[in-house]
Amino acid sequence: MANNFTTENELKTELINLSAILGLPKGTEVFVSDIHGEYDEFAHIMRNGSGNTKQKIAELFTGRLSSVSQKKLAFLIYYPSEILKRTKASIDDKDDLTQWYMDTFNNLIEMLRYTANKYTRSKVRKTLDPEFVYVTEELLYADNNMETKQLSYQNILDGIIDLQMADEFIIATCHSIQRLVVDHVHVIGDIYDRGPHPDFVIEHLARHWQSFDFQWGNHDILWMGSLAGSKLCMLNLLRICARYDNLTILQTAYGIDLQKMVDFSLKNYQAQTVFLPKSDTGKKISKSQATIDGCVQQAAAIMQFKLEGQTIKKHPEFQMESRLLLEKIDFDRQTITIDGQTYPIQEGCFQLIDREDPYQLTEDETAIIDYLMEQFANSEKLHRHINYLIDNGSMYLKYNDNLLLHGCVPVDKNGELLSLEIDGHKYFGHTLFDYFDEIIREALKNKATSQDVDMIWYLWTGKLSPLFGKDRMTTFERYFIADKKTHVEVLNPYYSLRQEEWFADKLLQNFGLENGHIINGHTPVRVGESPIMANGKIFVIDGGMSKPYHKTTGIGGYTLLSNSYGLQLVTHEPFTTRDKAIKEMTDVVSTKRVIEQAVSRKRVAQTDVGKRLKQQREELLKQLARIK
């Protein structure tokens, strides 16, 4: 940094600049989790700044704009293209439209000025559309108390309308406001899962936000592992997509050819009730598509169980011998014995299992898996998206004294950290997270070893995986055994202990933090439960965007806001559709609750960015001393 400044005046100017930045209020952080591919709801929350935009409009315009006008302005900022189209269609008179443009310009510029007031001009400029930077800055920093400036301001607005640039200018300004209302976005896991458009979520962040991070979730790991070369991750992913009638995400979004898998599945399996696909949206699934989904599920599941057996036998350190289930099937009686109890099999589909060697793939299965892995490896868009998750993500993050993680820190019932022993090394607490983080990066940036891809699969399903957090994954039992006692997956004690303040303190200390909070995703907060735990030291903010969880939670989930005034927990109502939200102007924010208020307004100097700027300032002061 110091090499960028060679003269005494340059150094002094930059020191003044750094001091100014350090004194500014801290930017607003939004924490969101468990998007599960529900792009429209995620995009709505990002467009409204998790309720922050509506609040700022109220602060600025109450007493000057009615509540209806405030709502119209809010939705214009959220969905400028759509609201412009609707508004213009409703105004017939040219003069009335011109007046609407003028009023809108003034309101948007005032809103832009209000949201920009805690940032440097340089940072604000980066949020502006390059085509409108000059015009916007002239309007933004105009002194309307001076007659000449006021005239210039009006001439600019007239020119925008006369040159038929009004719509483009409004859209660009609305997008700038969106970016200024939220300074930094934290996505605490599970962009991927059953929802239709995880690819849109990643594209949205890449296109609209300059400052964000991911903490990887268990469903993200399946996609990352598939690209790294894990056949087991790929088969789980494919099975889940078929389970929720979402094979199109593979075919359409990522260009993965599934025809050979479909043909193989229809040839070897037939429709069965337990493999009927589920529709989260209520959309009717055609009989032919349901048959494809069901047969693909069966084929993927059987291949998965076979490869799981091979992997578990190869890795005794995983301690997953209880999941060696195919060898426990009595094929003649169609029963299975688990933990000494015998259960009847419902709708078994074991015709491709060799009774003498149940974990051996057939030649056709091997060929299908190899072809699918080649398809994943050759998807340019998937490579781009997963690299994006790697470059901007991690297993956990320490940010402004908060610990962000998706799942859990594996512990025993007394809260003691459990260790996973690999090659003679024991990993627990933050070292367990660091170990998996290194494995994932190595596997995706370089040539993955079989050990690497097996460890990534363990992250999906292992009992000491920080992203899973249960004693077992009962996929086999849920398909083939009617007795629901066998379906139970016991949660790690972390999930009950996180109510305790001493436990939160212990975890923060293990990760090198003295104060702050643990911000968690992964588990929906059930009706009657509180997302605030451990006396306000742990927040669980599963975004609740996956529609089936709405019955469990009774709401649409939570997000968290951290600004210069403190912390706010935002409760969201269930999202319906984008079109309905725009047509009826229905927002998803139901309540905002202040859960921690700063004694004095927090400044950039008190943040992680501030620490880095202070280091830069020290380097510049040393260089200045050398020049003098």
Image (cartoon, rainbow, N blue to C red):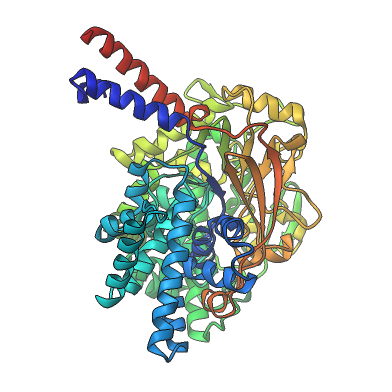
Q: Which residue occupies the foreground of this view, 105 or 397?
A: 105
> Looking at the image, can residue 488 be seen?
yes
| Residue at horizontal 52 percent and vertical 42 percent from the top | 459
Left or right, 589 with reference to 129: right
- Residue 417 visible, this orientation: no
Screen quadrant of the C terminus:
top left
Location of residue 358 in the rendering, given as x and y in whole percent from the top left corner:
51, 54
Relative to residue 236, is residue 471 depicted above or below? Answer: above
| Residue nearer the viewer, 226 or 122 | 122
x, y percent for residue 173: 38, 62
In the picture as drawn, the residue positioned furthest to the right comes out as 528
Residue in the foreground of this view, choosing between 436 and 128 = 128
Q: Quadrant of the N terminus?
A: top left
Count how many numbered circles sit on residues in the image: 0
365 sits to left or right of 322: left
Q: Is residue 410 left or right of residue 368?
A: right
Q: Looking at the picture, tell me which residue is in the foreground, 57 or 581.
A: 57
Q: Residue furthest front?
A: 147
Residue for point 33% across, 65% down: 256
Give the side of residue 361 with respect to residue 582, left or right. Answer: left
Residue 272 in the image: x percent, y percent?
59, 76
| Picture layout, residue 21 above or below residue 164 | above
In the rendering, at what x and y percent does residue 15 appear?
34, 23
Q: Vertically, is 48 above or below 450? A: below
